[in-house]
Image: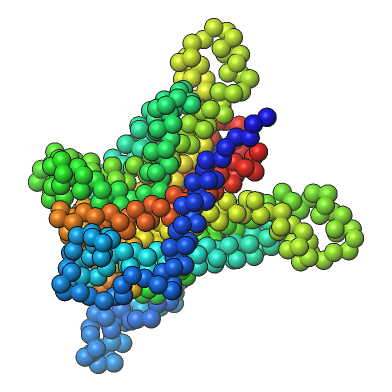
Amino acid sequence: MKYAVRKVLTMGVTILVVSFLVFLAFHIIPGDPALAKLGTQATPEQLEQLREEMGLNDPLPVRFVRWLVAFVQGDMGTSYSYQMSVTQMIGEKIPITLTMGMMAFGMMVGLSVVLGIYTAKHNGGVIDRVICVLNQLLMAVPPFFSGILISWGLGLMLHLFVPGSYVSYTKDRGGFFYYLLFPAAAIALPKCAMAAKLLRSSLIEELKKDYIRTAFSRGNTVNGVLYAHALKNALMPVITFWGMALADMLAGSIIVEQVFGIPGMGRILLTSISHRDYPVVQAIIVLIAVWVIVINTLVDLIYKLVDPRIS
Amino acid sequence: MKKKYNYNLMTGGILTVTMLLLILISVFYVPYDPDKMDSTAKLAKASFHHIMGCDQFGRDIFSRVMKGCGNTFFVAAGTVWMGTVFGILIGSFTGYYGGILDEVLMRINDTIFAFPSILLALVFVSLLGGGKYQIILALGIAFIPSFARIVRSEFIRCRELDYVKSARLSGAGSLRIMFVHILPNTRNVLFSAILIGFNNAVLAESGMSFLGIGVQPPEASLGRMMSEAQTYLLTRPSMALFPGLMILWMVLGFALLGEGISERQAG
């Protein structure tokens, strides 16, 4: 319990530090938000007045706290280029990217457990070797390349879906999930290969240990030992990897969204970067950072749950 | 006892050496000018003249792939160089001395480490603008924490070992102990970290170029070639395939090399 409280506290501090750093970074960059809003035709008096209105003349800590409070309350500012609330802009996109990320995560976990256990059990067999070679290859594939391969092979050749024909979840829920299957697979495959490889080597290591021999000597079956004893211990390093992968998947989806023409967070982030629409960029970066930090903390907590020896 | 054959090291070595050779050759010679547009050869199929065909502007894909590999390699090498140098500096001081400096730097380290590197690079790009050197700077900063962490833990492991104590007794200064005595002993760990970091850098660079914020046109880049080729995926899938396979080749080579080396060290 004490451990959990400490972890959550550290998480809070880290989130604060990160959001301050992001705030600072976007504060340092050259460019005047007031000027950006009014254009170069504005008189110095108008500029000064707007700066006062927007609170740009206050000291940095004051502005940070104000921004943070508004952010927590759900007001992420106004986009420069769309004159629209950032919360609204991002709010529509979050479900899309999140669904894709969770689908990819589910695929990765499911497939890697199945493949990892199978290859560890049949260590040295023909299928194990084939899967290992395939894994090695897949690990080297960048997610956008797997995305292109999937949209070419499954989309254009086998006609399972039409690349670029994204359906909004407000229109057709089934079509939405079906279309997202393919980009999710593109994100999941390379990660899945790594996770399966990790689980395989971790399981093989685990099966060499004394307690496994003891378990066998008591008359347990192979499957009994594998699932009741070895798997739980072997999963430890894999859980860490899954956590890291989940954090990474959000970043990976930025790229894969481009391949499949999905109007998610990645699309909005990229256009905002190219338009120098800083409130939007800032909000997305902070959101993703919070997501990553929360996941890292969760992994630590789960770890403790699985293995109480960790302090 | 018969020595076990190290397939990983062998394959990885061959892939890496051929890749490096290709890059080296591309510095002095490419079959065609990679930026020259030939309107008669637009989207030409692979032939003896253009062994990988031509792109939508009639530029020779093989020449562009060669140059693109060079650019990717350059960015990845720069990134890893930056990450390693600063990682060693930060990691060695914090690991050797410990204390409050260690505590503060490691917290900052953890914070940066929590960010996916491509996201951090995106932040920097939105601040600095896109381009080859900006990418190196951005990815380099994103890569420092992981190296710093590895070097730090090695220094913590080594600082109380007997050879360090004897060096201290014989009057060696802290700097000498750190960089002449301890650092060479971290080479095994550092080397595999460099290989893994290099691969991550290749993937990150090609990803950024794919998004159009990496290496800027007209300079050839593997990522950008693939994003341009997407439009022609139905008619000319090979346009996307070749640059993609090149990335695969590069990453696979270094990954297998790394595994082969650690296999060999393990004996």
Question: x, y (%) of residue A46?
Answer: 25, 88
Residue located 60% across and 44% down the image: B262
Which residue is outermost to the right?
A: B170
- Quarter-of-image position of residue A24: bottom left
In this orientation, which residue lies closer to the viewer: A64 or B21? B21
Residue located 32% across and 46% down the image: A187
Question: x, y (%) of residue A88?
Answer: 21, 59
In this orientation, which residue lies closer to the viewer: A5 or B74? B74
Is residue A180 at least partly visible in the picture? no
Position of B195 compared to B43: left or right?
right
Residue located 56% across and 26% down the image: A206
Position of A7 compared to A100: left or right?
right
Question: x, y (%) of residue B106?
Answer: 59, 57
How many numbered marks does the figure carry?
0
Which residue is outermost to the top?
A: A219
Is residue B86 at least partly visible in the picture? yes
- Quarter-of-image position of residue A266: bottom left
Position of A240 compared to A100: left or right?
right
In this orientation, which residue lies closer to the viewer: B135 or A37? B135
Residue located 46% across and 41% down the image: A241
In this orientation, which residue lies closer to the viewer: B165 or A84? B165
Which residue is outermost to the front?
A: B48
Position of B89 compared to B213: left or right?
right
Quadrant for the N terminus of chain B, please: top right
The answer to whether residue A27 is above or below residue B46 is below
Question: x, y (%) of residue B128?
Answer: 39, 75
Scheme of image coloration:
rainbow
